């Protein structure tokens, strides 16, 4: 088994693998996206076993004074999201939510639940 950089010739086989096994779970990875910092193929005897891309993720981490008036909190959140989407050169903004009220507000502003369980790996 060997790992190598993803090449244009891999698209067809990777697309077939994605359509056959993963299309209902997640969109085809954007191997050419601006936030893609690496793309690789692992193959065994010329057959692709795995193709993966490394993307930078933007995660919003906010500390909120929950004793503030709801109107102030909503306005502060709107301002933060406006500046965050302007400043970010990426196509998604991730956040981890612990408070169901916050989640409701974020969903109202266009956030969506991730499919599957979001995991992390310390490097």
Image (cartoon, helix red, strand yellow):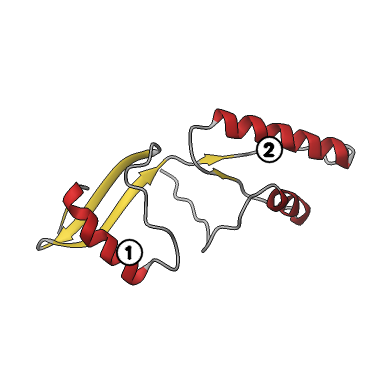
Q: Earlier in the sequence, mark 1 or mark 2?
A: 1
- Name the residue located 32 percent from the left edge and 71 percent from the top edge: 20
Q: Which residue is mark 2?
A: 62
Residue 7 pos. (x, y %): 19, 47
Q: x, y percentage for residue 38? A: 30, 41
Asked whether disc 1 touches disc 2, contact meaning CB atoms under 8 Å apart, the reply is no
Q: Quadrant of residue 66?
A: top right
Q: Position of residue 12 (x, y in %)?
A: 22, 59
| Furthest residue in direction bottom, as rendered | 20
Comparing 91 with 54, the one in front is 91
Instruction: Residue 14: give x, y in percent of width and height.
Output: 26, 59
Q: Residue at x 45, y 46 (%)?
A: 122
User: Is residue 90 shown left or right of residue 82?
Assistant: left
The residue at the point 72 percent across, 51 percent down is: 108
Viewer-side residue, 102 vs 24? 24
Mark 2 neighbour density, 10 Å: few (under 14) some (14–19) many (20 or more): few
Q: Which residue is mark 1?
A: 18
Tell me which corner region of the image, top left, top right, bottom left or bottom right, holds residue 72: top right
> Can you say whether 35 is above or below 28 in the image?
above
Determine the residue positioned at 37% across, 41% down. Answer: 33
Q: CA distance from mark 1 to mark 2?
A: 35 Å
Q: Is residue 61 left or right of residue 46?
A: right
How many marks can you see? 2
Front one among 123 and 72: 72
Mark 1 closeness class: few <14, some 14–19, many ≥20 residues within 10 Å: some
Tag of residue 81? none
Quadrant placement of the N terminus: bottom left
- Label 2: which secondary element: loop
Question: Image quadrant of residue 5?
Answer: top left
Query: What secondary structure is found at the residue carrying circle 1?
Result: helix
Instruction: Name the quarter where the C terminus is drawn.
Output: top left
């Amino acid at each position: 088994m060997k790992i190598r950089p993803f090449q244009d010739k891999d698209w067809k086989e990777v697309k077939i693998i994605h359509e056959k096994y993963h299309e209902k779970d997640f969109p085809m990875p954007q191997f050419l996206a601006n936030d893609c910092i690496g793309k690789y193929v692992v193959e065994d005897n010329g057959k692709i076993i795995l193709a993966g891309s490394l993307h930078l993720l933007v995660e919003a981490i906010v500390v909120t004074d929950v004793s503030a008036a709801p109107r102030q909190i909503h306005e502060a959140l709107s301002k933060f999201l406006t500046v965050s989407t302007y400043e970010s050169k990426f196509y998604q903004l991730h956040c981890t939510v612990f408070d169901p009220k916050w989640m409701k507000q974020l969903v109202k502003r266009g956030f969506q639940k991730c499919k599957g369980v979001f995991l992390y790996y310390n490097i």
